[in-house]
Image (spheres, grey):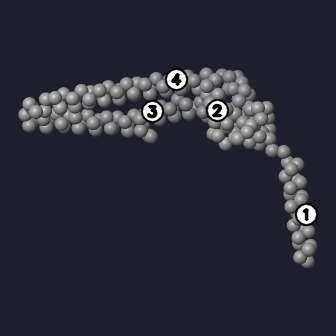
Amino acid sequence: MKKFAIILIVCFLLVSITSFANAQVKIAYVNSDRILAEFDEAREAQNKLEIEARKLEEQYKGMLSNLDSLSREYERQKLIMSEARRTDKEREITQLQQSIQRFQVDKMGPEGEIYKKQSELVGPVLEKIKIVIEKVGKENKYDYIFDTVAGNILYAEPAHDLTDKVLYELKRTK
């Protein structure tokens, strides 16, 4: 009885291994950095986002410059200021520091304006790319498509690179 169970398990394993070996899994990959660099809509969205980021950066630098000037002026004149004037200047500096901190959070923080703008501009482009990758995958009957940028692939045969097909489909869908 024990020998029969062992023979049955070995037979089951052999059948499983054989059927697994015969099953062909079709795998391919894309390079998302290249897609984003060569896809016009992605470049346009990125350019618009960079313009918005530069505007916010200029505002931020202006605020910092203003704070620096105010602080230097205060340090230079604090010994000759009246107590009331000194208190007013310190309050003004503190308010400007707080304003700068609010600006950082509201505009550049994790839920800030720049990330909302990124989602608004780049989100639809990424969705379009995802749809096209799925389309190319289904048309070419791939089981898995990986992204080389994610760093999950240690070796990839160039013949399985679908980047060109994805770019072609993206340009064709205009």
* Left/right of residue 18 with respect to residue 107 in the rendered view: right
Say whether disc 2 or disc 1 marks the residue closer to the N-terminus: 1
Q: Residues within 10 Å of mark 2 (few under 14, many from 20)?
A: some
Q: Amino acid at mark 1?
A: Cys
Residue at 89% of width from left, 59% of height from top?
Answer: 14
In this orientation, which residue lies closer to the viewer: 41 or 95? 95
Picture coordinates of residue 42, whole percent (x, y): 59, 26
Name the residue beneath numbered marker 1. Answer: 11
Q: Are marks 4 and 2 in contact (CB under 8 Å)?
A: no
Kindly identify the residue that appears in the image at 64 percent across and 40 percent down.
151
Residue 15 falls in which quadrant of the image? Answer: bottom right
Q: From the image, tell me which residue sits under label 2.
A: 32
The residue labelled by disc 3 is: 114
Spot occupied by residue 165 in the image (x, y as percentages of width and height) = 74, 28
Q: Residues within 10 Å of mark 1 (few under 14, many from 20)?
A: few
Residue drawn at 18 percent across, 36 percent down: 90
Q: Residues within 10 Å of mark 3 (few under 14, many from 20)?
A: some
